[in-house]
Image (cartoon, rainbow, N blue to C red):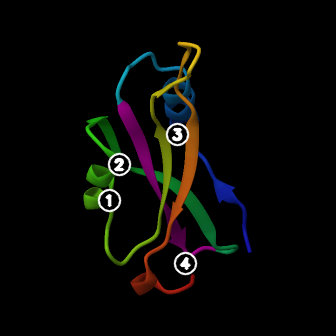
Amino acid sequence: MGLLIISDEIKAKLKKFRFRRANDIACLIFKIDCDDNVSPPTKTLVLDDELNDIENIEDLQEELPDCYPRYILLSYKIEKSDGRIMYPLCFITYSPESCGVH
């Protein structure tokens, strides 16, 4: 089993997303590409989609494939009782029943 390859481009995209200054719900959707034709086999993290201005979380569900796993980095707005506004990051593993185990 090999390590997951994360390109410098993906690392820069993650950093930019982490420090973004928007007021909307947004997410980065990733997939893992496997190349078994090389030795040792490689796995690469690939940006599948980037969604901004999401109205609600249900909109995100419509963008996900029915048969393939995805990895989602989600940023959303929380307004605390003391008036502070926070934008936490959540990492979501999406694995529909129809995709099986890889």
Q: Which mark is residue 57?
A: 2
Q: Which mark is residue 37?
A: 4
* Badge 2: residue crowd in 10 Å (few <14, some 14–19, many ≥20): few
The kind of residue tagged 3 is: Ile
Q: Are marks 4 and 2 in contact (CB under 8 Å)?
A: no
The kind of residue tagged 2 is: Ile
| Magenta span includes 83 | no
* Badge 1: residue crowd in 10 Å (few <14, some 14–19, many ≥20): few
Q: CA distance from mark 4 to mark 1?
A: 33 Å
For mark 2, give the secondary structure: helix
According to the picture, the residue beneath numbered tag 3 turns out to be 10
According to the picture, the residue beneath numbered tag 1 turns out to be 61
Looking at the image, which residue is at 58% across and 49% down? Answer: 91
Query: Toward the viewer: 74 or 7?
Result: 74
The kind of residue tagged 4 is: Asn
Looking at the image, which residue is at 74% across and 75% down? Answer: 1
Which portion, as a residue range, is magenta?
A: 25-38
* Badge 3: residue crowd in 10 Å (few <14, some 14–19, many ≥20): some
Mark closest to the chain's N terminus, 3 or 4: 3
Q: CA distance from mark 1 to mark 2?
A: 7 Å
Query: Toward the viewer: 14 or 64?
Result: 64
